[in-house]
Amino acid sequence: MGLWKRVSERTKQTLGLKGNEANWKPTSNARNTAMIEEARKFSKQLKALHRELKELGMRIDTGLSTVRTVLNAPLPRVMEMSDKGPVPVEKETGIVGSGVAFDVLTAAGSDVRSKLQAEVLHPLDQWQAAYRMIKHRNSKCEDLRLELDAKRREAAAMNVTLEKQKTRAHAADAKTPPVSEGGAGSPNKFEDAEFKLQKEEDKVTRLTQRFKDVEAEVYNALLTLINDTKVLKQYAATALVVYQNGFAHAYTAFSEALQSLQLTTSQAHMQLGVGGGVGAAPGPGLESTPSKARLSGGGDVGSPASGGASPPTAGLPVSTPPAPPAWYNEARQAATSMKYDSDDDS
């Protein structure tokens, strides 16, 4: 069906124009439309979260780079006056971060960004990609709905016209007896019209089944999207773990430097007669960065806690939802990074 007929049908439904049947109602796609509207509102919030998490990861990387630059700067030197003017007491220039492992600082910043992208941002991108595909499929479902309703109107109009013609023909036959076979009252007179009506009704039946199939596909995809939404809190927790591990990793760059500083300060206090005095204690001992962060529930990040399945959320079907259509998973696999300034929920 062409664009004009779909626009015409949409206009008729907007104006509340019914078909030729007294009980004619537009085909409903209301449940999918309502669910997509709520998903649209959540999508905007998810986009804001994605932006903040990504920018925070970039700021951590930039911040560690600034720390590395400052620690690699030369130390101001002590000067003494000589015949030639001020000369440094120590000829060799030291740096602020002597003993700091600069490569560890570099690796820590890069690890934060890469792990954040792989373990947090990409899953959020996949959710957004699935949502965009659902919107696209639902727009196709809406086109099919309008096509179906336009065809229903045509079939209903043809049926009313045919009934009126039969009524007039029967009234005429009652007044004037037929002169020969094939007259006004012959049953073959409306055979062509009845055949055309049957063809239209068959089209309506086929379109109805197609619409039901597509509508059910979109609905099942929405159920999967909602279930995917329930575990998004785990990715927020994962982001915090990634940040924490990044800082812990960066802190290990100072292990040798702080240990040396502690020994030097302790010796200086002992020489000054500070009984038992010690220098600044190093920071708390650090464990090696865990290979996989764990949530408080004991489960791995990105997977439900080991405490068992979470209780069903109110308002959702208790039974296991049907598997989503193939295009839902294809959209997730083809997910790209979000565009924050776009209006198409990308």
Image (cartoon, grey):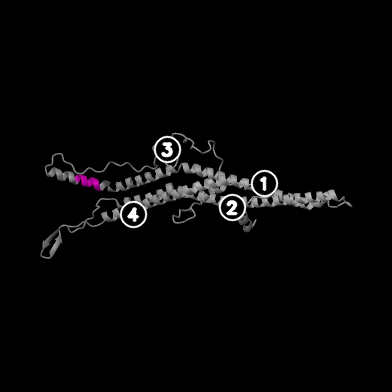
| Inter-mark Cα distance, 3 to 2 | 51 Å
Q: Position of residue 212 (x, y in %)?
A: 62, 45
Q: Amino acid at mark 2?
A: Thr
Q: Earlier in the sequence, mark 1 or mark 4?
A: 1
Q: Which residue lies under the disc numbered 4?
A: 62
Q: Which residue lies under the disc numbered 2?
A: 14
Q: Looking at the picture, does residue 66 appear above or below residue 275?
A: below
The magenta stretch spans residue 259: yes
Q: Residue furthest right?
A: 179
Q: Position of residue 73 (x, y in %)?
A: 25, 57
Number of the label disc, if any, that sits on residue 271: none
Q: Earlier in the sequence, mark 3 or mark 1?
A: 1
| Inter-mark Cα distance, 3 to 4 | 31 Å
Q: Main secondary structure of the magenta part?
A: helix
Q: Nearer the viewer, mark 3 or mark 1?
A: 1
Q: Which residue lies under the disc numbered 3?
A: 299
Q: Secondary structure at mark 2?
A: helix
Contact flag, marks 3 and 4 (Cβ < 8 Å): no
Q: Secondary structure at mark 4?
A: helix
| Inter-mark Cα distance, 3 to 1 | 59 Å
